[in-house]
Image: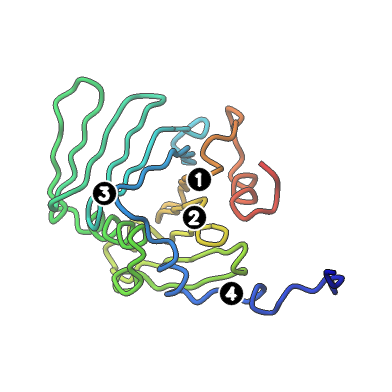
Amino acid sequence: MALPSSGAAPESALAAPDPAALVASLAQSPPARTRFTEVRFSGLLDRPLILSGELEYLGPGQLAKHVASPWQETIRVEAGEAVIQRGDKPPRRVALAQVPELEGFLRGFSALLGGDAPALARDFELAVQGSAANWQLHLKPRDARLARRISAIEVDGRGSTARCFQTRDADDDLGILLVADLATIDLPTRPSSRRLQALCRGLVAP
């Protein structure tokens, strides 16, 4: 017969996870694919921009983002360059070495998906809040060039699953990328950043 619960969660469940252990638990075995919904908030936009599509992690340093709506665009990162193709237009190639801040961001994102905590820590300061069941991983760029473009990245998740990636740039514009179970929720035409952040942190139901 099961003993009645005291109602108190184990201390280990309430403690914030170790950053390195948390990152390692997020490792994806390539090829890994997930649907996404991205919401961009900017002072230059009349309303938030909502994109949806699929993300691919193809191995260290190899990423792809396929946007299906509101336009069709594919961005592939591999072999030190980004290849961008929108619709039927010819692809554009950008050498990452020419854009060091973008290279640092993508290197960090790849390290995160690969569960490579030492590589991630080389480019970002890591801090974790919350508990193992509902955590927030904060990434602060170490490189001054990247910090001039991106002030902070926050990853929200549960257990070993990341559910949201929030990126705030130096102009205070905010991008919120919803993945996993949050990628398919219905959003209003004018979603609130505060509501989405509460959703990412598990404070409100989808």
Residue topped by disc 1: 180
Residue topped by disc 3: 58
The span from disc 2 to disc 4 (Cα, nearest Å) is 15 Å
Q: Which of marks 4 and 3 is nearer the N terminus?
A: 4
| Residue 165, image x, y percentages | 46, 52
Residue topped by disc 4: 16
| Label 4 with label 3: CB-CB less than 8 Å | no
* Identity, as a three-letter code, of the amino acid under mark 3: Leu
Residue 81 versus residue 172: which sits nearer the camera? 81
Q: Which of marks 1 and 3 is nearer the N terminus?
A: 3
- Up the image or down, 9 lies above or below 107; here it is below
Q: Left or right: where does residue 120 sit relative to residue 196?
A: left
Q: Earlier in the sequence, mark 2 or mark 1?
A: 2
Residue topped by disc 2: 162
Q: Earlier in the sequence, mark 4 or mark 1?
A: 4
Kindly indicate the quadrant of the structure image that contains residue 51: top left
